[in-house]
Image (cartoon, helix red, strand yellow):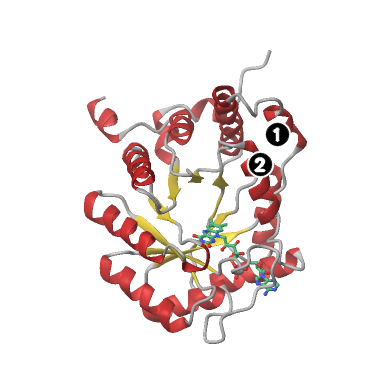
Amino acid sequence: MAEQPPLRASRFTAAGARRIRVSFEFFPPKTADMEKTLWEAIGRLGSLNPAFVSVTYGAGGSTRERTHTTVKRILAETTLVPAAHLTCVAAASDEINQVVRDYCEAGVRHIVALRGDPPGGVGERYAPHPRGYRNAADLVAGIRRITDVEISVAAYPEKHPESPTVEADLDMLKAKVDAGAVRAITQFFFDNEHYFRYLDRVLAHGVSIPIVPGILPVLNFKQTRGFAERCGASVPKWLADRFDGLDQDPATRKLIAAAVAAEQVLDLVDRGVREFHFYTMNRADLVFAICHLLGLRPQANREAA
Ligand SMILES: Cc1cc2nc3c(=O)[nH]c(=O)nc-3n(C[C@H](O)[C@H](O)[C@H](O)COP(=O)(O)OP(=O)(O)OC[C@H]3O[C@@H](n4cnc5c(N)ncnc54)[C@H](O)[C@@H]3O)c2cc1C
C-alpha cells in the first residue's frame, strides 16, 4: 500500500499545528446553569489560543444585553479577543449605531455584521426596518462610518435560502466586502465539495477575503437536521445513515459526531484549509477533541513541553 501523502502526515506535527487558526462561536446564556456551562467551555477552548471567540446576537436583537454582558466579561476576565455579533433586523439604524458605540467603548475590536432573520423566522419575507439598515452590506458600511473595527460577515456555500440565485448571493457577499468586511465565515456544511465549489465562485466573482469554513459538530442529529432545513444547508444521506438508530443512544452519538467532524476537518486540512470557525453550541468537549486532532494543545501544556 502506498504511503500517505506528506500533507496528511504533517497535519499532526507541531509545525502543522502552528499554521492552524481556529475561532469559536458561543451564544449568550439564558440561565445561571447555562452560564456555568458557557464559562467552562470558554475556559477549556480558550486555552487553545483561538484567533477570536465570537458571541451571537439573538434573533431580532433579543439577546442584546446578554451578548453585551458576555462580551464584556470575556474582555474583563480573559485574554481572548471577542468578536461581537450584531444584526440589523427590526431595529432603527440609530439604535444599531448606539450598540456599535457601546461595543467600541467596552473595548470590542471585532464585529460580525449580519442582517438577521425576519422576526417571524426563516420563510417570512424580510422587510427592513423603515429607519434601519437594509441588509448586511448596508450595516457594514454603517459600522465603517463609526469605527475601524475588524468586520466579519456571513457567507453561504449552498446559497442563502432567500437569495434568488447563486449570482445574487455572491453579489451580496461582494457588496459586504466592498463596504469593508475583511473575513467571511460560512454557514455550516457537511459536504466539503460545496465549500470548495463556493471558493471557486467567490474568487471568480472578484472576492479575495478569507472564507473561513464554519464547522458544526452534530451533537444532536434531529435538531441539526431541522436547523439545516431552515438555513438552506443540505444534509447528505450518508450523514443521516451514520446517526440512524442512535436517537436513544447519546454516548454512541457523541462518538459518531466526533468521527464525522474529524473526518470533515481533516479532509479540509488535506486540501489546504488552515482556518476554522467552530459552532460550539457552548460545549467544549467535541470541539476540543477535534482541535486536538488538528495538533492544537492548551497553552499551559505547550509552555511546559
Ligand atoms: C457565521 C454566521 C453567524 C451568524 N450569527 C447570527 C447571529 O448572531 N444572530 C442572528 O440572528 N443570526 C445570525 N446568523 C444568521 C443570519 O442572520 C441569517 O442567515 C440571515 O438570514 C442573513 O444574514 P446575512 O448577514 O447573511 O444577510 P445578507 O448578507 O444581507 O443577505 C444574505 C443573502 O440573502 C439574500 N437576501 C437578503 N435579503 C434579501 C431579500 N430581501 N430578498 C432576496 N434576497 C435577499 C441576499 O442575496 C444574500 O445573499 C449567522 C449566520 C452565519 C453564517
Q: Are marks 2 and 1 in contact (CB under 8 Å)?
A: yes
**Label 2, label 1: how many angstroms apart (C-alpha)?**
8 Å
Residue 74 image offset from top left, x and y in percent: 29, 53
Left/right placement of residue 60 relative to residue 194 reads left
Left/right placement of residue 234 relative to residue 92 reads right
Tell me where residue 48 sits by quadrant: top left
Residue 199 image offset from top left, x and y in percent: 65, 54
**Residue 13 sits above or below residue 31 on the image:** above
Question: Whereabouts is ligand 1, in terms of quadrant?
Answer: bottom right
Say what secondary structure mark 2 lies in.
loop
For label 1, the residue is 239
Q: Residue at x 50, y 75 (%)?
A: 139
What amino acid is labelled 1 in the image? Leu
Tell me where residue 21 sits by quadrant: top left
For label 2, the residue is 190
Disc 1 C-beta below 8 A from ligand 1: no
**Residue 196 sits above or below residue 251 on the image:** below
Between 162 and 9, which is closer to the camera in this rendering? 162
Q: Quadrant of the C terminus?
A: top left
Left/right placement of residue 128 relative to residue 104 reads right
**Residue 195 appears in the rendering:** no
Q: Residue at x 42, y 79 (%)?
A: 95
